[in-house]
Every structure is written in structure tokens, then in C-alpha cells.
Image: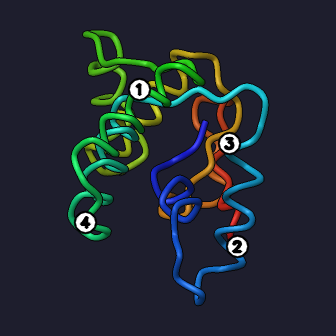
Amino acid sequence: MSISNTWLYGFSTDKKEETKRLLAKQLIKVKYIIISTQVINEVCRNLLKKHRIDEQSVLNLISSFYRKYQVISFNLNILATGSNLRTQYNISFWDSLIISCALSAGVNILYSEDMQDGLIVDKKLTIINPFK
């Protein structure tokens, strides 16, 4: 599973982020990727706001996510688990939902530049900063 910055670096044209872009492109090509609707939301918001891409491109990207990857949507169990994770690990609301989605999908590695590198959640999921 990947977090939004991984996708955003993959789309970046900023020469200062070239190393991160190349690494992100490699991560995105991994055979089996699970992504949460939260990550799709963050990627689209950032591409619209910061990169000013057009609406049709956003729709194409969303379709591509659903076509290529397993997408995990929120449900009561994910929201409740997210609440427990926030309390237990002192993480943000949005990060807890991403982690909860990953746990519900049985993911064992979550790539994140923003979350605590090396954190092991519920003895099942390791958060790794691939850009460290």
C-alpha cells in the first residue's frame, strides 16, 4: 500500500524531486498494490490544487486507480479501528484511516513519507519511509 506522497512524487516534474520521482515510479509499478479511498482523495486534491490539472485528468486518474489496484473504502469497522489506532498510537485522524484500511486488507507494509518510519502497528503492519 502506498501513501499519497508516493503518488504525487510519481507525477512530479520538479527537478529537485527527481530522485524521489524515480523511486516513486518504481514503487507504483509493484505488482500488487492496495490503496484506500483516503489516498485517492488526497492525491486528487493535491493535483487539482497544487498542480492545477484539469477535471478530466482527475477523473481519468480515479478510473485508473480503480482499474489497476484494489481500492479499500471506509466502513464502520475501518472507522472504529481508526479511532482505536488514534488513541493507541497518537496519530492523526486521516493517517489512522489509511492505516486502518491497510490492516483490514491484510497489508504488511505501508509506505509513507509522513508517518513514523519503522512503526509496527498491531504486530502486523510496518510503516516504511521509502524516501529516507
**What amino acid type should be assigned to the residue bearing mark 1?**
Ser
What residue lies at 34% left-to-right and 45% top-to-bottom? 57
What residue lies at 63% left-to-right and 60% top-to-bottom? 117
> Nearer the N terminus, badge 2 or badge 1?
1
Up-down relation of residue 44 to residue 23 (above or below): above
User: Which tag is nearer the camera, tag 4 or tag 2?
Assistant: 4
Judging from the image, what secondary structure is the residue with disc 1 in? helix
Gap in angstroms between the C-alphas marked 1 and 4: 19 Å
**What amino acid type should be assigned to the residue bearing mark 2?**
Lys
> Nearer the N terminus, badge 2 or badge 3?
3
User: Which tag is nearer the camera, tag 2 or tag 1?
Assistant: 1
Circle 3 residues within 10 Å: few <14, some 14–19, many ≥20: some
> Nearer the N terminus, badge 4 or badge 2?
4
Query: Picture quarter containing residue 112?
Result: bottom right
Gap in angstroms between the C-alphas marked 1 and 3: 28 Å
Q: Which residue is mark 1?
A: 63
Q: Which mark is residue 109?
A: none
Judging from the image, what secondary structure is the residue with disc 2 in? loop
Q: Position of residue 33 (x, y in %)?
A: 65, 29
Query: Picture quarter containing residue 84?
Result: top left
Q: Position of residue 53 (x, y in %)?
A: 29, 59
Circle 4 residues within 10 Å: few <14, some 14–19, many ≥20: few
Circle 1 residues within 10 Å: few <14, some 14–19, many ≥20: few
> Nearer the N terminus, badge 4 or badge 3?
4
Q: Which residue is mark 2?
A: 132
Q: Quadrant of the N terminus?
A: top right
Q: Which residue is mark 4?
A: 52
What residue lies at 59% left-to-right and 24% top-to-bottom? 68
Q: Quadrant of the C terminus?
A: bottom right
Q: Which residue is mark 3?
A: 126
Judging from the image, what secondary structure is the residue with disc 4 in? loop
> Nearer the N terminus, badge 1 or badge 3?
1
